[in-house]
Image (cartoon, rainbow, N blue to C red):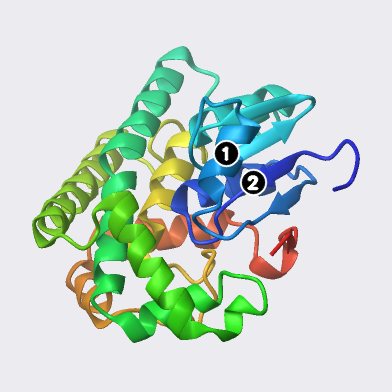
Amino acid sequence: MSVGKPTLWQIQVSHYSEKARWALDYKGIDHVRRTPIPGTHIPIALWLTRGEGITFPVLQLGGRTIGDSTAIVAALEDLRPDPPLYPADPAQRARALELEDFFDEELGPYARLLAFHELIGDPEVFAELASRTVPPPLSKMKGLTGAYARALTSLRYGAQRDEAAAEAREKVLAALDRLEAELAASGGEYLAGERFGVADLTAAALFYPVVGPVEGPLPPDAPVPAAIEAFREGISDRPGFVWVEEMFRRHRTPRSAAVPSIGR
């Protein structure tokens, strides 16, 4: 790790990690990324945060260790206010932070669970995807990595349960309804104010497992379960779905320009 550089501890496929990566890249902050094997991130997060957090992302910044993507965005806003992610107007800022909290709590966990549920139902695709997120030589052991990924997501999130997946679908669709209602209420292209900000970044990042934008953290040739493809097809013409794609297209740093991950 380079001395003095912020270090982001992340899970490559995580949409909450994507939220933190996007904030770092949007603000042009040079940083290092650490990507341990999924599952080992829990004890690492506990160690980094001295028992306060069990998951990633975690950001080491100027002698501080910051868990939770919302706290990370706030710290980055303090560190580098320009370009801003928080609106200057107090009312718009309050609206942006309320929407950030809504999508963090009412979209993020359910988008993740739904994606993992459909991956568990397609073991070959899950094995292929999992093999791309672990270091060699594990990346060559698709059967092992796939079995590990299915076990981890079942134990950690209960993602194998059909009833949990049904609730997740309802929650994702409700979040899409809320996104479209908020965009209509704002009367503009962004959720709070006249420019891209924390509410837009959060909603777009946390919808990425559902929408699958080409600028997202997964390579364009990453395998996708047929059930996720079908779910996307059913909502792909909705204004909120198109808006998520547009936010990535306009405001996400291209993959080739992103800081390379290390420790993988």
Residue 16 at x, y percent in the picture: 47, 46
**Can the viewer see residue 56 in this picture?**
no
Work out which quarter of the rendered image holds the C terminus and state it: bottom right
Nearest the camera: 103 or 149? 149
Residue 37 at x, y percent in the picture: 58, 60
Q: Name the amino acid type tagged 2.
A: Trp
Q: Circle 2 sits in a helix, a strand or a loop, which is it? A: strand
- Which is in the foreground here, disc 1 or disc 2? 1
Question: Mark 1 or 2 closer to N-term?
Answer: 2
Q: Name the amino acid type tagged 1.
A: Ala
Give the image quarter of residue 59: top right
**Relative to 52, 122 lies left or right:** left
Residue 75 at x, y percent in the picture: 64, 25
Give the image quarter of residue 175: top left
**Can the viewer see residue 202 in this picture?**
yes
Instruction: Give the crowd class for mark 2: few <14, some 14-19, many >=20 residues within 10 Å.
Output: many
Instruction: Give the crowd class for mark 1: few <14, some 14-19, many >=20 residues within 10 Å.
Output: many
Give the image quarter of residue 57: top right
- The answer to whether the residues at label 1 and label 2 have Cβ atoms under 8 Å apart is yes
Query: What residue appears at the point 57 percent right and 39 percent down from the top-left corner?
Result: 45
Query: What residue appears at the point 56 percent right and 69 percent down from the top-left corner?
Result: 133
**Rendered view: 90 above or below 243:** above
Residue designated by label 1: 45
Residue designated by label 2: 9
**Relative to 72, 3 lies left or right:** right
Residue 246 at x, y percent in the picture: 44, 60
